Image (cartoon, rainbow, N blue to C red):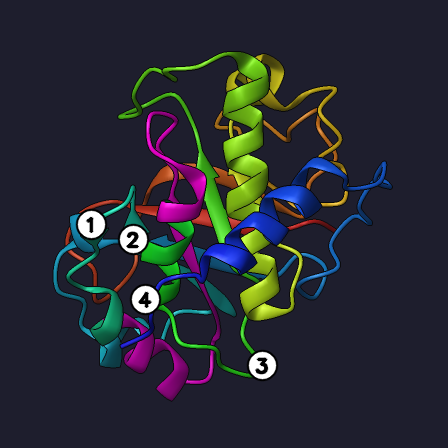
Amino acid sequence: MRRGLWPGLAGAILLLAGCMPASRPPEASPLLPPGAEGIDLSHHNGAVDWTLLATEPFEFVYLKASEGTGHADPQFQTNWASATRIGWRTGAYHFYLLCRPGLAQAENFIRQVEVRAGTLPPAVDLEHAHNCAAPGTRAETMGELRAFLAAVEAEYGQTAVIYTTPAFHAEWLAGEDFGRHPLWVRSLSGPPDLTYAIWQHSMKGRARGIDGPVDLNRAAD
């Protein structure tokens, strides 16, 4: 089990987060082959029959690992082992809560996801649904998010992916210099207007081995 972040390291991360340089717009899809199809999964999808799922023409999967400061997705470890065994590009994501400290959330994610070579970059899920109200000012809230991102990127050595919706992006992320982070955008009515690396185009997909609907994603062309 990993120890918590040292106080000195935590302070350095906060300082780094507050001094990050202006960022450049991401390329269309630095993560995946153009047009690659994939899914994302959490415990809400239940137990997965990976033998059947492996017959689907997907190339990648993002798996929920954690939420907030204390929740670990109970299906994460099983899903991770199965996804990597069948050879899919695999990544983990954290559901970020606006009302919880960023560094503590990063520690929760890091506890669940061991550093592994060849994986997709870590992703942070930023959306209004099932979230909580930010207790501080906008500047304080963005500072907590930057601290989370800095800690995760220091741990994994990769630029984190930001999953979001157009509405959340417009309210919280636009104009905040997050442009260096590849965007994974949910847009169910058509391609996003935002520059994206991954487009979540359906929450009602079907796939062998999964009971019920599953989120469908496509890498930018």
Q: Which of marks 3 and 2 is nearer the N terminus?
A: 2
Using the image, determine if residue 90 lies above or below residue 36. below
CA separation in Å, label 1 and label 2: 6 Å
Residue at disc 3, secondary structure: loop
Looking at the image, residue 173 sits to the left or right of residue 58; the answer is right
How many residues crowd around disc 2 within 10 Å: few (fewer than 14), some, or many (20 or more)? Answer: many
Q: In the image, which disc is placed on residue 66?
A: 2
Q: Mark 4 points at which residue?
A: 111
How many residues crowd around disc 1 within 10 Å: few (fewer than 14), some, or many (20 or more)? Answer: some
Q: Mark 1 points at which residue?
A: 71
Q: Looking at the image, which residue is at 27% across and 45% down?
A: 69
Q: Give the range drawn in magenta.
A: 79-104
Q: Nearer the viewer, residue 16 or 56?
A: 16
Quadrant of residue 110 within the rendered picture: bottom left
CA separation in Å, label 3 and label 2: 20 Å
Q: Where is residue 49 in the image (x, y as percent from the top left)?
A: 18, 73
Q: Nearer the viewer, residue 25 or 151?
A: 151
Specify whether residue 58 is in view: no
